Image (cartoon, rainbow, N blue to C red):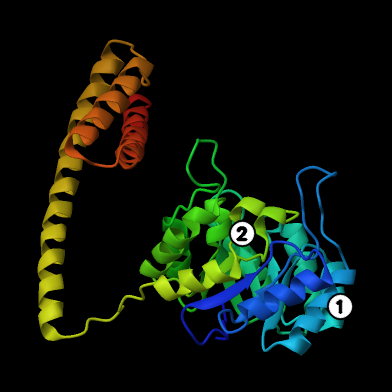
Amino acid sequence: MEIKKFINKKPYLIAGPCSAESREQLLAIAKLVEGTADVFRAGVWKPRTKPNSFEGIGTEALAWMKEVKQETNLKVTTEVATAKHVELCLEAGIDMLWIGARTTVNPFYVQEIAEALKGVDIPVFVKNPIHPELGLWMGAFERLNNVGIKQLAAIHRGFYSYEKSVFRNDPKWELPIKLRKEVRDLPIICDPSHIAGKATLIEDIAQTAMDINLDGLMIETHNNPHLALSDAEQQVTPEKLKNIMQNLVLRDTKLRDEQFKDQLLNFRNHIDKFDKNIIELLNSRKDIVKQIADFKNENKLTIFQIERWFEILSTRKENAKLLGLDEEMVEEIFALIHKYSILTQTKIMRK
């Protein structure tokens, strides 16, 4: 993919209300975030789960966004979900566009948007799909790139999870890291508002995004969050936005001096030794798994024993708790180990 850089500072900040609610609201918020934000955002069309929810003002709000451009130094951006949305935004002079999570999941929609953008290389942000499917996310960038869109960036807004969590959407920080590995030059913006679901969690999520070296933030900002027509709980005030940005710690991604390098190298050498031990232990465990497979085969036992699986989960999590380790992390690790134990046994027993 050919990516043309358009983000030239860190952290790059996109801020503004979840939805454009009125001309007065947009102008008031834009003037309050000017000087803090680089780009002003507002949803003009809002894809909602239920039809009677507020689905945005629509085309009329594009004129208000145009006014924001005229009365401030901010660029403006909004979400597009159809080719018609693209056409209307281009006519209104919207500077940047983003494709939402519900649209990213559908390659047909993304292709239609890409076709509508052919020949117009403006910045386009793509939010991750609702579920953690890196292929779908990558596919959206490729479709846009194929029609000549080179000013591309990702928005990490977390992923839907069936499990109860403090977050609205599971951050799954490993996914943006994997995306960066696939497309090194692609800027990645974090959307703490949609990950958090609550304004009180946004600052911590924003700091984590900076700690893993993401390029910027998209934070929903409203002058009266409790009166917002959509996503009221996850919007911050312009004053809180300013505090969040001032409190961010931007860590040095390069090693500053030789002493620092040596100390970090020492830590990494210890980690390498531990990792080597873990791999050797996994190999020894695999040898036992093979013996178990032979035993089950001889005695006509089923491969998957649910009581054993529950015992593994329970005891490993209890051990983790005693050691002060994250129980969820340990559960995920052993779920993966158990999965490959089952696969190993299956291969042996089918020979």
> Residue at position x 16%, y 65% from top?
268
> Residue at position x 77%, y 57% from top?
46
Tell which of 121 and 247 is nearer to you.
Answer: 247
> Residue at position x 61%, y 77% from top?
152
> Residue 35 location in percent, x, y?
58, 84
Tell which of 109 and 284 is nearer to you.
Answer: 109
> Residue 118 location in percent, x, y?
78, 80
Q: Mark 1 points at which residue?
A: 63
Q: Which of marks 2 and 1 is nearer the N terminus?
A: 1
Q: Mark 2 points at which residue?
A: 235
Q: In which quarter of the image is the N terminus?
A: bottom right
Tag nearer the camera, 2 or 1? 2
Report the number of numbered marks: 2
Q: What element carries label 1?
A: helix
Disc number for residue 342: none
Q: Which amino acid does label 2 sit on?
A: Gln
> Residue at position x 41%, y 70% from top?
210
Q: On the image, which quarter does residue 67 sit in? A: bottom right
Label 2 CA crowd tier, 10 Å (few <14, some 14–19, many 20+)? many
Q: Is mark 2 on a helix, strand or loop?
A: loop
Tell which of 85 and 16 is nearer to you.
Answer: 16
> Residue 280 location in percent, x, y?
14, 46
Q: What residue type is labelled 1?
A: Ala
Q: In which quarter of the image is the C terminus?
A: top left
State left or right for residue 300 relative to residue 25.
left
**Is residue 351 shown to the viewer in this render?**
no
Q: On the image, which quarter does residue 129 sit in? A: bottom right
